[in-house]
Image (spheres, grey):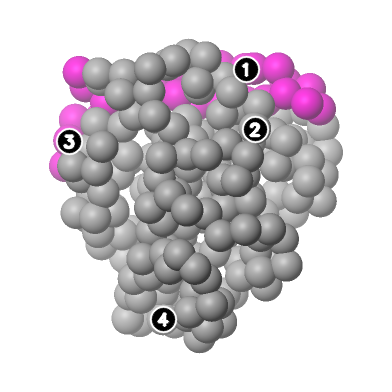
Amino acid sequence: MAKAPAKESISIAGPAGQLEVLLERPEGFDGRRVAVVCHPHPQHQGTMLNKVVHTLARAMTDIGVAAVRFNFRGVGASEGEYGGGTGELADLEYVAAFARQRWPEAELWLAGFSFGAVISARAAEQLSPARLISIAPAVNILGRNLRSTPAMPWLIIQGSADDVVAADDVMEWVADLEPRPELIILPGVGHFFHGHLVDLRELLVARLAGND
């Protein structure tokens, strides 16, 4: 794996107060690509330090992409309180605007896990990222709130043994999308990828490396 990225913890102004943000830049970062990564549900212990979110961020830096993690409103040091999804979508839009201001020449990627996958996919229509990555998306929420199918390259990774987001539900949902995202099902893997985080990281690197 690549050398550990340079980390910078900051606070930025968000729509409901200050947002806690963690920037991670790979060694020799060229400023070409930056990924904003969204964490799981705030009301179910979801934070930017979640292991799957950490794995997503490290996979990004492994391939030379800066990673921007943040805590949604009311989580960690981020001010405010849970916004029912709508507030969290606004939080993401503020963080994405910050990332674009920080690296104005970089293309924006959006990524997320579970609830975070819902928020990032919903934001794709407004933010027009160059790439979208969804890990175990909560399709019971996503299916009701996705106004249009994101047209950019979209990678979805789902465990077959997920007891929170059923793999069959994800496969059925993806089958109805046009354009069709790339869906990868990992056999025997649960929602939190216990025992499979290295596999997830390696898969992300393999699928995303070289995508400009």
Give the distance between the C-alpha atoms of the residues marked 1 and 2, in whole angstroms: 15 Å
Ranked by sequence position, the earlier of labels 1 and 4 is 1
Circle 4 is placed at which residue position?
160
Q: Which of pointers 1 and 2 indicates the residue nearer the eye? A: 2
Q: Is residue 212 left or right of residue 53?
A: left
Q: Tell me the amino acid under the disc marked 1.
A: Ser
Circle 2 is placed at which residue position?
93
Q: Is residue 50 left or right of residue 95?
A: left
* The N terminus sits in image quarter: top left
Ranked by sequence position, the earlier of labels 2 and 3 is 3
Expressed as whole percent of the image width and height from the top left, the position of residue 180 reads: 43, 68
Expressed as whole percent of the image width and height from the top left, the position of residue 73 reads: 74, 35
As helix, strand or loop, the secondary structure at mark 1 comes to strand
Ranked by sequence position, the earlier of labels 3 and 1 is 3
Residue 173 can be seen in this image: yes
Magenta highlight: main SS: strand
Q: Tell me the amino acid under the disc marked 2.
A: Glu
- Residue drawn at the location 17% of the way across and 35% of the way down: 2
Give the distance between the C-alpha atoms of the residues marked 2 and 3, in whole angstroms: 29 Å
Quick check: 71 above or below 104? Answer: below
Q: Tell me the amino acid under the disc marked 4.
A: Ser
* The C terminus sits in image quarter: top left
Q: Tell me where the magenta segment starts and ends, as one range.
A: 1-28
Q: Is residue 188 left or right of residue 210?
A: right
Circle 3 is placed at which residue position?
2
Circle 1 is placed at which residue position?
11
